[in-house]
Image: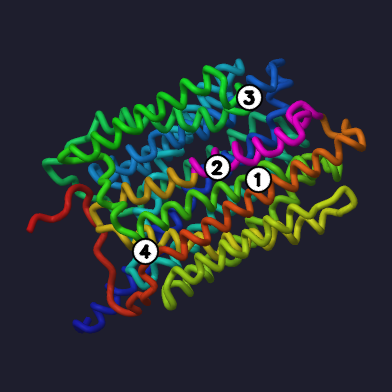
Amino acid sequence: MSESDASVVKVKKGIEAKWLILTAVMLGAFMGPIDASIVNTVLPDITGYFKTDISIAQWVPTIYLLTISCLILFYGRLGDMVGYKKIFLTGLASFVVASILCGTSQTIWMLIGFRGIQGLAAGLLMAVGYAIITAAFPPFERGRAMGIYAVSIAAGLGLGPTLGGLITQYTSWHYVFFINVPIGVAALIWGARVIPRSTTKPGQRLDVPGALTALVFLTSLLLYANQGETWGWASPRSLALVGIAVVFGALFYWIERTSPQPMLNLALFKNRRFSFASVSTLLSFVALYAIVFLTPFYLLFVLHFTILKVGLALIASPLATMFVAPLSGAMSDRFGTRVFAVLGMCIAAIGLFLMSGLTATDNVWAVVWRLFVIGLGLGMFQSPNNSEIMGSVPPWHLGIASGIIAAMRNVGMVLGIAIAGAVLYNLAPFTASAQPGSFTPSEMQEFLRGLHWAFIASAGVAGISAFTSLLVAGQQKLPTEGGGPPFPGPGAPPSK
């Protein structure tokens, strides 16, 4: 074989490798969002099975979101230190085991505890996914890869309610967790084969004080956002959480400023591209999760849908995201990220505003086309924005940058539910304990009014996200030829 032929074979192998790496990450990442959306659908079955109160059963989805979010930054830094593959595969294996434990739980408290462990495992998966992809793809293909990766996230969020409805109708809630096992095992085997191994660099230390203060800060903040409506936003318990969050947030900032090897290098936020794009991610998920939280209320209470029909209707938004995200990501590689991120969030804001116009006489198609518009906007936004974040950091910080994206996403989910719920319950307080079909005509009007203003508030959040996306610098086109960086080893920047 000639030298030129050998080089062609090498290039082909490189091209195949990066796409195989992407499929492995997508297969593993699919399980996190599907489990975030599927359990709410079967929660009534879980409540009845264990003969418990809904206020206790609600901790099954709540603890999952909380434990995912509270250690994600720590996982991202750990990935930079010990290698992304090790973190990702550990998360996969732990997720499979935790899913089995959840499905075989004998009491509601066992299920809540195992669900928390499952959230910790999902955090490992989410924390380094973007880092693995960014390291595998050259800059001129990063947006395209992010767009294709977004398909797995959207598919998980979209299929969750539908699968939950099918499982509720034909089997039992246990299979919500058991379906993770074959997917997780396949992802574990495939990921072990194709994801490159990173070499550990000496001299790296874990910032334990930073990790602990971040854990307390995030847990307190998210618990307040999640339970504030139930406990009372100004109740002693809630205010104590706010005080703890403020104290430990300040401690975390001081530790990270003074640590020689901080868990989160605050200098990253001096980069305008990174900081504004990260804020845009947070706000986009605040807006998105208003849809996830509010729309089932409308479909159940106003249109009187079954759980299965609710799940089928909710597919519209992630289906649109799955369609447009790869196209938007690929186009952003050629024309820059900012225009697509701004336009996408403007479209999402319009869709959310249109949702506020739903009435008691509308049909399912009035909901579906509005959800489709929102999904188009979010799909147009997410891939370019994630590409902007990952492209704005040096290779030795890919893990923590990936962790920040995941943290912003999950904190946005919790805040989105909190904000939408606060608006709805303040204007229609009876909704918190209402049952489908129980509204009087006057209550229906109050409910629709609460829904109207909750969607408008979410549209405003999406509009702010569009503005912060506009402030992101770096509109220049990325190079369209030449290779990207090699898959980096974890750890500190190379010595000069």
Counting other residues with Cα less than 10 Å from the Cα at mark 1, is it few (<14), some (14-19), or many (20 or more)? Answer: some
Q: Are marks 2 and 4 in contact (CB under 8 Å)?
A: no
Residue that sits furthest to the front in the current view: 234
Residue that numbered label 3 is attached to: 230
Residue that numbered label 4 is attached to: 18
Secondary structure at badge 1 equals helix
Q: Are marks 3 and 1 in contact (CB under 8 Å)?
A: no
Check the image and report above or below for 56 versus 42: above
Residue at 65%, 59% in the rendered image: 374
Is tag 3's residue or tag 4's residue first in the polypeptide sequence? 4
Work out how far the residue at label 2 is from the one at label 3, CA to CA, in angstroms.
Answer: 17 Å
Q: Quadrant of residue 170?
A: top right
Check the image and report above or below for 2 versus 274: below
Amino acid type for the residue under numbered disc 4: Lys
| Magenta span contains residue 416 | yes
Q: Quadrant of residue 202?
A: top left
Q: Are marks 1 and 2 in contact (CB under 8 Å)?
A: yes
Amino acid type for the residue under numbered disc 2: Met
> x, y (%) of residue 264?
28, 43
Q: Is residue 454 visible to the viewer in this orientation of the structure?
A: yes
Residue that numbered label 1 is attached to: 292
Is tag 2's residue or tag 3's residue first in the polypeptide sequence? 3
In this view, the mark in front (4 or 1): 1
> x, y (%) of residue 465?
52, 56
Stretch of the chain drawn in magenta:
410-434
In this view, the mark in front (3 or 4): 3
The front one of 192 and 22 is 22
Residue that numbered label 2 is attached to: 413
Residue at 65%, 45% in the rendered image: 292
